[in-house]
Image (tube, helix red, strand yellow):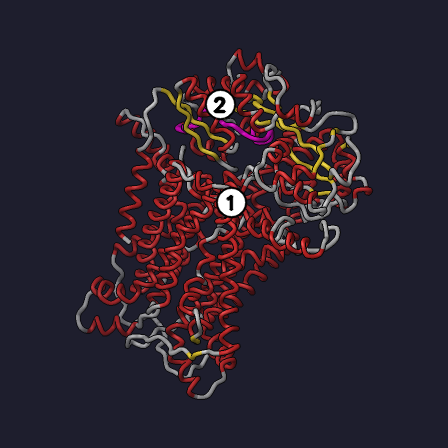
Amino acid sequence: MSLGVSLSETRRSPLAWRPSTFLVFAALLGAGLALLPVLALAYTALSPQAASIWPHLAANVLPAALADTSLLLLGVGALCAAIGVGSAWLVTQFEFPGRRGLEWLLVLPLALPTYITAYVYVEILGFQGPFQTALRALTGWRSLRDYWFPDPRNLPGAIFIMALVLYPYVYLSVRALFGLQAAAIVESARTLGASPSRLFWRVGLPMARPALAAGLTLALLETLNDIGASEYLGVRSLTLSIYTTWVNRNSLAGAAQIACVMLLLVVLLMAVEAHLRGQRRFALPVRQPRAVGRSPLAGWRAVAAVTLCALPVLLGAVLPIGFLAAEVLQRDLWQQFDGAMLRSLANALAFAGLAAGLVVLLGIGIAAARRQGREPWLPALSRLAGLGYAVPGTVLALGLLVPLAAFDNLVADAARRWLGVNPGLLLIGSGAALVLAYLVRFLAIAVSGVESGLSRISPRIDDAARTLGASAPQVMRKMHWPLARPAVAAAALLVFVDCLKELPATLLLRPLNVETLATTVYGHASRGAFEDGALAGLLIVLAGLYPAYRLARAGGRAG
Amino acid sequence: MTHAIRLSTLALASCLLAVPAFAQSVNLYTTREAALLNPVIDAFTKDTGIKVNAVFLKDGLQERVAAEGANSPADVMLMVDVGQINALVEAGITQPIKSALVDKTVPAALRGPADNWVTLTQRARIVVVSKERVKQDAITYEDLADPKWKGKVCIRSGQHPYNNAFFAAYLARNGAEKTESYLKGLKANLARKPGGGDRDVARDILSGQCDIAVMNTYYIGLMSEAKNEQKSWYEAIKPVKSTFANGGTHVNVSAAAIAKNAPNRDSAVKLIEYMLGEKAQTLYADGNFEFPVNPDVKESAAVKLLGTITPDTTPLGDVAKNRKAAADLVDKVGFDN
């Protein structure tokens, strides 16, 4: 990729430090935690009772599941890339009415869990939804025997719905790149007289590749690990096959085997992606980056830009949030806002806040160790730490259950023997198990967020500081931290919102008498009365609203 | 950031410490819905002074209790499906329920091996049809695979535990070959891919997408009481007398077991006995349009709604045993694809 402007390539500085013991410890801790459920999973998979499951799976389950999953990933990937890159390009390169608002609103769909968006779309597009009702009123048709209407309960529907929730991952990472790194290059291309479309295809898109890959990886792993929406929309994904293998055949070992194979595939794909990308990341020039000058749009072009950016916001956020709000208002659901709901809200915020804080601390440790250290195993460690994100939430929770409960039992037995007290189950009983599960699940987001923040800081800064006699911690505190802070904050916010939405691990690992907003929504949905959970659903969105706003702001400035 | 951590730690600590002191307590692990159990739990605490601590799980209850091992706080495990409750016994994490009252109230056929579990309520899985477009009042399950219903049948995923148990009962009665051809025939009759939940099939009947569907009885009752558009789904359907070809309606159970390492075994027995009592059966079975197991509960809402039902005589243990084979057949014919 030859670019007209020289950017210094990030490479290991020849003056690498030995990373501090603390950082290495954080990196090892993160990787160790991430490996814990994976190892437990492998151990479960090796149990002898599962030997007979593969012939059946290979003949009857995997072909369809693989086909469905591949199509789902392809579809969601293509849509997420189109929406994410397109809208990021528009809001960073052009000036049009409402751009500032749209810039942060485009993040908003992320605040909705996929299972809620899926449910809402089935309602809205359903027979008694506003569209079909209006259509019947206009035409005099009476039932679906008289006309055809799109039904979201199928693979195309699932692709559309998941892409609407997940495109912000792509949007956020690509926008950060377009907003800053591309500025100098785009401007030179512009002065050389490149047309806007040529600018996008020949300059913007190639530049966006690493950021696109990073955002797509997150979105696709979310897609791969989804159970709630897939099940509701009737998509037979691999993850759902793992799940039914476990539940109906009572074969946890068989499920663990499929999960292990799936994990291998994911790791393989990630390795391919990393190889294709090469270790090519671009750091900013040492001087303070500046935002790109936007070219103003007027007339039909402005209208088109507004429409294109508003559409994903409308479909992914306004419509579902409006539906939830309407349910709450129409049916007086705000009366559900009692002590129990308040406790669910407090629990959700506490677990998510705690997890986000810890995840980011670990993420900083891992990313910093990798930047400072010369040891060849440090990059591998940071990849290992991201494994948790590639394991479906249910499977991850099951994998964590065994080692955590074993630890709890050790502690309880020891306390009884030596102290004569029974502390109960320390980790599972206190909710610490749940925070650990979030940590393992979302460490990848923190590591990649912090790494991308650090990778934009030229190693020459480190070198210059060193020649002036600064120590490694000093460089981190005085140079890296201020420059990488927005990226770190963005990672923390993203993890926070993800924890708020997380359902399978939350369901399985929460202590007695503890509900969160997500489990409250599930409690209603499992009775087939999802609409009763509208208030809890709305609270999830509201709790994620401010983080989403800050996320958009953090990524938009130097970060 | 640090501020947020401090705040959330405080909040978490306050959640964990805000447990009121009761002289006695019992810990309940369940896959049943909170909204359904909470009234019974509250009544139990009011009447006995025993506090109930509950955790409402989806799947993995068995794995969690097994992993928690000797120090597990679980006392009572309350499950929504015969397969689930049987799996607990097979995993060796239950103990016999020793209670003369339980033995007297619940017939042996509705109790697990060596009294390791006991049925609390029964629910039937029946056929509903379009009030407008289908005239008959009775049907056999076998009939659902008859080509005359081509493109008219709606049902949720064949791998959902409710359908899994239903197909397992079919398998226990008819053997693998007949069940496979039944599943093929049923699949050929589907109006849409299997998916959604049990209530959705009623909506699909209203919309004209299908004429005939399969659902659990209590959903019919709950829709009849709905305050929103679900009422109109209910009004579009008609439950029909549904039986296997030689009699008997497919019935599944909600059932309770006591954990092997229950720290509060006496309270656990008390809770189960209470749930079989007339008051709780009225609240819990009747409130959910299920069939009570306590014969003293007369005129239950479910009976009013659907008339009396003669359960299929296939032993529940046989249904549970055939689950895996039924799941395999569902995969084999590509039922959900």
Q: Residue at x 53, y 41 (%)?
A: A525
**Can residue A2 be spotted in the picture?**
yes
User: Where's residue A363, x and y in %?
Assistant: 34, 56
User: What secondary structure is found at the residue carrying circle 2?
Assistant: strand
| Magenta segment includes B79 | yes
Residue A418 picture location, percent across and down: 27, 27
Position of A474 with respect to A28 (left or right) is left
The question of residue A72 being in magenta is answered with no
Residue B198 visible at all: no
Residue A49, located in which quarter of the rendered image?
top right
User: Closer to the camera, A387 or A190?
Assistant: A190
Chain ID, mark 1: A
Query: x%, y% of residue A483?
Result: 28, 67
Q: For the C terminus of chain A, give its image quadrant.
A: bottom left
Q: Dot 2, how many residues are within 10 Å of its Cα: few (below 14), some (14-19), or many (20+)?
A: many
Badge 1 is on which residue?
A330
Relative image position of residue A332 (x, y in whole percent): 48, 41
The mark tally for this picture is: 2
Chain letter of the residue carrying label 2: B
Q: Label 1 amino acid?
A: Gln
Whether A20 is drawn above or below B184: the answer is below
Mark 1 → mark 2, Cα distance in angstroms: 43 Å
Question: Range of the magenta residues?
Answer: B71-86
- Residue designated by label 2: B258
Q: Which mark is residue A230?
A: none
Q: Is disc 1 placed on a helix, strand or loop? A: helix
Camera-side residue of A197 and A487: A197
* A311 vs A35: above or below: below
Q: Residue at x 53, y 52 (%)?
A: A117
Label 2 near label 1: C-beta < 8 Å?
no
